Amino acid sequence: MTAGTTRRAIPLRWPAAVAVSLVCTVGLLAFVWPFVVSAEFATSHGNDAPWFFAVLLALLALVCLAELTSGRLDAKTIAVLGVAAAAGGGMRLLSAGTAGLEPMFFVVIVAGRVLGPGVGFVSGSLAVTTGALLTGGVGPWLPFQMICAGAVGLGAGLLPVAAGARAERWVVAGYALLTGLGYGLLMNLWFWPFLGANAPTGMGFVPGAPVSENLNHYGVFYLATSLGWDLPRGVLNAVLVLVAGPALLRVFRRAARRAAFDAPVAFEQPPLRTALPDDPRVRAPKPPEVVGR
Amino acid sequence: MHLRERLQHPAAWWLWGLGLATAASRTANPVLLLLVIGVCVVVVTERRDPATPNPLVPFLLIGGFIVAFRVVLTAVLGNGINGPTVVFSLPRVPLPDWASGVRLGGPVSLESLLFALYDSLRLAAILTCLGAANALASPRRLLRYLPATLYDVGTAVVVGLTFAPQLLSDARTVRSARTLRGHEGRGIREISRLAVPVLETAFERSLGLAASMESRGYGRAVRSTVRDRRIASALALVGLLGVLGGLYGLLDSSAGGALGLPLLVVGAALAAASLAVGASRDSRSGHRREQWAWTETLTVLTGILSAAVLVVGSVRGWEGIVPTQRAELPAVPLVAVVAMLIAATPAFFTPRPRQVDA
C-alpha cells in the first residue's frame, strides 16, 4: 500500500452505507419539505414541523453514528476523531466573534479526505456537537447541523480525485466553496417555513402555493439575508484549503500512517525454535532452577 | 427545610427547559412570553451551575438582536400582515422585475410591526428557555447518559472537549513565538502556518493518549456479539426505511396519508430500539452517579404542567393565547399565568448547587 492512498479508519460496510444514505435522504426531506408538501399539511402543521424534524433528526443522527461505528471503535480512531472534533470545536470558539464565518468545515473536509467517508461523517457531526457543547449552544438546530456537517465530511471522502494528485488541491478547494454556500442554503430552510407570514413580503413560505413561487420566494430570501454570510464563509474555506490544504493533508496522512489503521492484526503461532521429534507442540519452558539460598 | 447542596440531575433541568420552550412555542402573547423569559432568568440566577460561564447572557443578547432585527426588517420590507393603522411611511424604492414580489419602503402599519414583535418575542423566549437549560445543567453532563452503543462516540466527544482548550492555548503559544521572531500574526497565510504545528502537537498528544488507552486495555472487553450487531443493523435499516416511507405518506397526502403517521412512529421506534440492543449487557460502573430525588420529579412536573396548559389553551382557543395586533394590552389567560409562576418554583424548592471556592 502506497503512502498516498486513502486510509479508512472506519470501513464503510454495506449496512452502514445504506443507513447513512437513508439518513441523508430523510435529512434532505427535513430541509426541503416546504417545497414538496401538500397544502393542507402545511397549513395545519407548518408551525410544528421544524420541531418535529429536529427530534426526528436527533434520533436518526444517533442511530447513524451507532451504525457507522458499529458499537466499537479502537483507541486510535477515537484519538483521531477527538482531534478532528477538538479542532472543529476550537474553530467554533474562535469564530464566535466573526458572525458565523466558520472555518470549521476546512478541518472536517481534510479529515474526510484523508480518512475516508465514514470518518468524514462522524468527525463532521462530532465537530459540530463539540462546538455546541463548548459554547453552550445546544438547541433544535444542532441535529440539522450534525447531519449537514456529516454529509460535508462524507462527500469530501467520496471526491473522485486521487489522493496526493496535483489536482486534489483545486478540487477540494472548489468543494469547500460549494459546501460553504450549500450549507447556508440548506440550514436556512429549517426555520424558513417557521417565519410564515412574518417573513418580509415576497420572501415568505406560502402554504399551498406552487413550487415555483415558493422557490422564488426562498431565492429572494436567501439573496437578501443569507448570501452575505455564506459567500464569505465559502470563500474563506476555499482559500484556507488552497493555502493550508496540502500541508494539513500531509499532517493528517502522517498521523494516519503512524496510527497504522489498516495494518492487519493476526495472531499466529510463533515459529518453534527447536523442533522436537516426539512432541510438535510448544513445551512450557522449564522453570529456572532454584539455586540454594 | 434544608436540602444538601448538590447539582440537580441534568436531565431534570433539560426536561423542564424543553417543557417551558414548548409552552412558549404555543403562544404569541407578549405578557406570557415576557413571563417565560422572567421565569428563566429567576431560576438561572438562583440555581445556575457555578462551574461554567453563564450561557444565558449570550442567548438573551441573541434574542434581543432577533427582536430588533425583525422589527426593523418589517418596517423596511413589510410582511404578510397589512393593517389599516399606518404609523409612518418610508420612501418606496422601485425594484427590478425578478424581485417584483418584494416591497422596499412604503407605508408601515402598526399591525405588521406588532405581529413581527410578538412573533420574534416568541422565538426569543424559546431561545431563552434553551439558554436556561444550558446554564442550569451543562449539556456535557448529559453525555454520560448516552446508550452503551454510542459509548465510543461519547468518548471521542469527551476527548475533543478536553483537547479543544489545549489546542487554543497551543495556538496562542505558537503565535507568540512567531511574533517574537518578527512575523506579523495576521492574515490567512499566517493561520495556515499556525495550523500545521498546532495540529501536529494535537496528533502527537492524542496518539499518545491512544497508546496509553490501549496499554490499559481500552476496547478489549467486547460485550456485544456478532448476533447483537446484526440485529441492531437490521433494526436500524428497517426502522429508517419505515421513517422514510412514513414521511413520504405524511408529506404527500394523496399517497395514503393515513398510513404515514403510524409507519413513521413504528419506524422511529425500531430505529431507537437498535440503539438499545446489547446496551443492557454492558455493565460499566459509574463514578459519582447522579441521584434522582423528589425535587427532580417535581421540577420536571412543573415544566410539563406549563407545556400542557398552553397546549390545551391553544387547542381550545382561549382568549389571549394568540393576541390581536391592536394597540392595547392583550387579554391574559389567568390559568396560563399561574402555570408559568408554578414553573418558576424550582428556583426555590430545589437544592442549591455547591458554591465553588474562589
Image: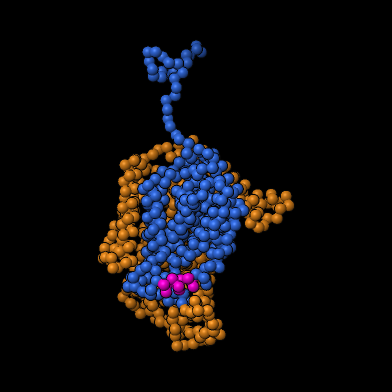
**Residue B28 figure quarter:** bottom left
Residue in the picture at 34% in, 48% down: B233
Foreground pick, A283 / B47: A283
Main secondary structure of the magenta stretch: helix
Residue B1 belongs to the span the image colors magenta: no
Q: Is residue B190 visible?
A: yes
- Residue at the outermost top position: A292
Chain depicted in blue: A
Magenta range is A212-221
Foreground pick, B159 / B353: B159
Chain depicted in orange: B
Q: Indicate the position of residue B300 as horizontal and vertical percent values.
A: 37, 61
Residue in the picture at 36% in, 43% down: B282
Q: Indicate the position of residue B323 as horizontal and vertical percent values.
A: 40, 79
- Residue at the outermost right position: B182
Residue in the picture at 48% in, 84% down: B110
Q: Does residue A4 lie above or below B344 as drawn?
A: above
Q: Indicate the position of residue B262 as horizontal and vertical percent values.
A: 27, 61
Q: Is residue B311 visible?
A: no
Q: Does residue A15 lie above or below B73 as drawn?
A: above
Residue in the picture at 38% in, 73% down: A210
**Residue B115 figure quarter:** bottom left
Foreground pick, A25 / B304: A25
Q: Indicate the position of residue B98 as horizontal and vertical percent values.
A: 49, 76
